[in-house]
Image (spheres, helix red, strand yellow):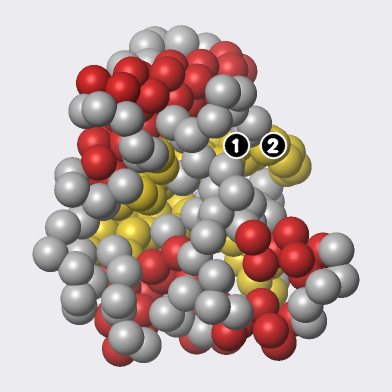
Amino acid sequence: MSIFHHCGKTHVGNVRKLNEDSLISVPELGVFVVADGMGGHSGGDYASQSVVGHVDRMDRGMPSGEAMRAVRTAFLESHYAIQAEAERRGGGTIGSTAIALILSEPHFACLWVGDSRLYLLRDGQLIQLSRDHSLVNDLFDSGQITAEEVETHPHGNVITRAVGVGETLEIDKIRGTYEPGDRFLLCSDGLSGYASFDDIRHCMLSAPITSVCDELIALALAGGGRDNITAITVEIPDYF
């Protein structure tokens, strides 16, 4: 039985008619995934649903130590399935971000492609653990733009990696250990782009786990909500 308290919610936002985000929680394996589709005309929602659909096929009885490899395999299988669907539709680009949190006592791992994010709240401090695969992040890392320009750059929504795009899928990974009281947040850029870092931190710090996703989505909607909004929060209890 899972020791993790968690919640997950998605919202179409204030502007769009179609929700191209998808999410899945598999607490018995310690696996949580958010995917944000791109492509329009139902291509984006197909792509994000492909990511979570392949994760959903994972064997629930596998040892927890095998979950990270299984998630990586699911991302790769989805990559090729999305490409095949794009070809079936006559070409063009469809794809999805994908970010996964995998918990196996007392370790965590994160696998990701694109600009959906993983945050960790520990001892009152919020830290972004993932690094956006985005054009503006590459420009910032190379010194071509400042941190202030990152926030207002006209190409802020251009990602440089996506599941289903490109011949080879490059998946980044980080690992660490979790502690009692830690809270993790996985989210699409519909949250991180429309709610401030400080507001996200305050909500993660103060809201109960049962309502934190609703409150995070409310922040993004109040901030404009021009994109789909998805969040999964996972709390490590004070005992484990």
Looking at the picture, which amino acid does disc 1 mark? Leu
Q: Which residue, as the protein is rendered here, is positioned at the far right?
A: 143
Q: Is residue 219 above or below residue 56?
A: below
Q: Which residue, as the protein is rendered here, is positioned at the far front?
A: 90
Q: Is residue 92 above or below residue 56?
A: below
Residue 186 is labelled as: none
Q: Position of residue 114 (x, y in %)?
A: 55, 48
Q: What's the distance in space between the residues labelled 2 and 1, CA to CA?
A: 5 Å
- Name which residue lies at 66% across and 67% down: 136
Q: Which residue is mark 1?
A: 111
Of the two numbered discs 2 and 1 on the same chain, state the one appearing first in sequence. Answer: 1
Confirm whether residue 78 shows in the render: no
The answer to whether marks 2 and 1 mark residues whose Cβ atoms lie closer than 8 Å is: yes
Quadrant including the C terminus: top right
Q: Position of residue 204 (x, y in %)?
A: 49, 73
Q: Position of residue 186 (x, y in %)?
A: 48, 55
SS at circle 2 = strand
- Name which residue lies at 74% across and 59% down: 138
From the viewer's side, name the closer residue of 73 and 108: 73
Q: Which image quarter: residue 113?
A: top right
- Name which residue lies at 30% across and 76% down: 226
- Left or right placement of residue 116 versus residue 153 in this view: left
Q: Position of residue 32 (x, y in %)?
A: 43, 40
Looking at the picture, which amino acid does disc 2 mark? Lys
Q: Which residue, as the protein is rendered here, is positioned at the far left?
A: 17
Q: Which residue is mark 2?
A: 173
Q: Residues within 10 Å of mark 2 (few under 14, many from 20)?
A: some
Total labels: the figure holds: 2
From the viewer's side, name the closer residue of 205 and 240: 205
Confirm whether residue 65 shows in the render: yes
